[in-house]
Amino acid sequence: AGLHGDEINGVEILRQSMSMGLFDQLLRGNVIVIPILNIYGFVNFSRVVPDGKDVNRSFPGSMAGSLASRMACILTRRVLPLIDFGVDFHTGGDNRFNFPQIRYTKKDEKSLTLAQAFAAPYLIQKPLLSKSLRKTAKDHDIPLIVFEGGEALRLDGFVIETAIKGLKRLLIQQKMIDGEQFPVPFINFKKSSWIRAKQAGIFIWSKKSGHKIAKGESLGSIYDPSGNTRVAVLANRDGYILGHNNTPVVHQGDALFNIGYEYD
């Protein structure tokens, strides 16, 4: 967790998991827990490291590169060779809230199996991002799933509890801890897209992450500061809200709602 220093839900998920002894009685294997990877960003309430670079766009990294690149290189060289699979914990960035979800790699059956075992409320198929940890893990034939939940610099009890339960289900499925496997409902999305602001103004949402929506349904409004105009934000398709923007003032083109569709 803590690849982005301001995404603290992941830090708390792992802290609570260790505190409750989730990894103390393993039946096989080992768990490598990294509660805070980007300690520089964590202590400065920042997504990035002091040089302004994003660690999760710096993989596989280089010990002759920037600070972000060196951090990525250490993880690539010292941790990835030791693991069979991984879970990377994140939250929404830039005041965006994500409903608890697992992102898995498109056309990768291993990561899909891990995602189904974790069984967050939403599963989302995603392509690999260049220079990301997930892409570098895939290059090493290591399946890695990404948990997303909540928003930066805010702890969310529901998100944390959901993630810990999912992590426990995953360890049970991997036969690393004792426990029964019960079917947990989830929705698996094949595609997602953003609804963006058509004008600048004060944004107030009326529907939030986790809601099922229908095309044409009102999701919120954008007002001009003088109170003379209101622009309705309407759903452009049927689907579910995967994430929403909590920023009170938005600019034209800003991302407001992330909509998941083509699901099963």
Image (cartoon, rainbow, N blue to C red):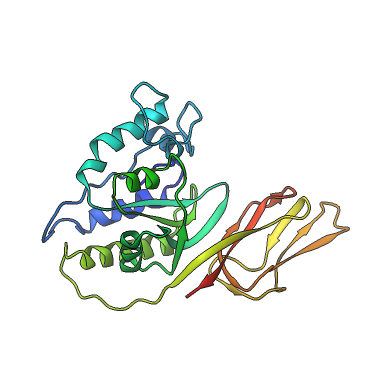
Q: Position of residue 111 (x, y in %)?
A: 34, 59
Q: Is residue 14 positioned above or below 187 on the image?
A: above
Nearest the viewer among 114 and 233 is 114
User: How many numbered tags mark residues here?
Assistant: 0
Q: Position of residue 211 (x, y in %)?
A: 57, 72
Q: Position of residue 11 (x, y in %)?
A: 36, 48
Q: Which residue lies at the image location 47% right of the left edge and 46% below the top edge?
A: 129
Nearest the viewer among 259 and 205 is 259
Residue 25, picture quadrant: bottom left
Q: Which residue lies at the image location 68% right of the left edge and 50% below the top edge?
A: 254
Nearest the viewer among 68 and 142 is 142
27 left or right of 67?
left
Q: Position of residue 121 (x, y in %)?
A: 43, 69
182 left or right of 225?
left
Residue most toward the front?
Answer: 107
Q: Which residue lies at the image location 47% right of the left edge and 53% below the top edge?
A: 127
Residue most toward the right?
Answer: 228
Residue 77, picture quadrant: top left
Q: Is residue 171 positioned above or below 254 on the image?
A: below
Q: Which residue lies at the image location 71% right of the left edge and 50% below the top edge?
A: 253
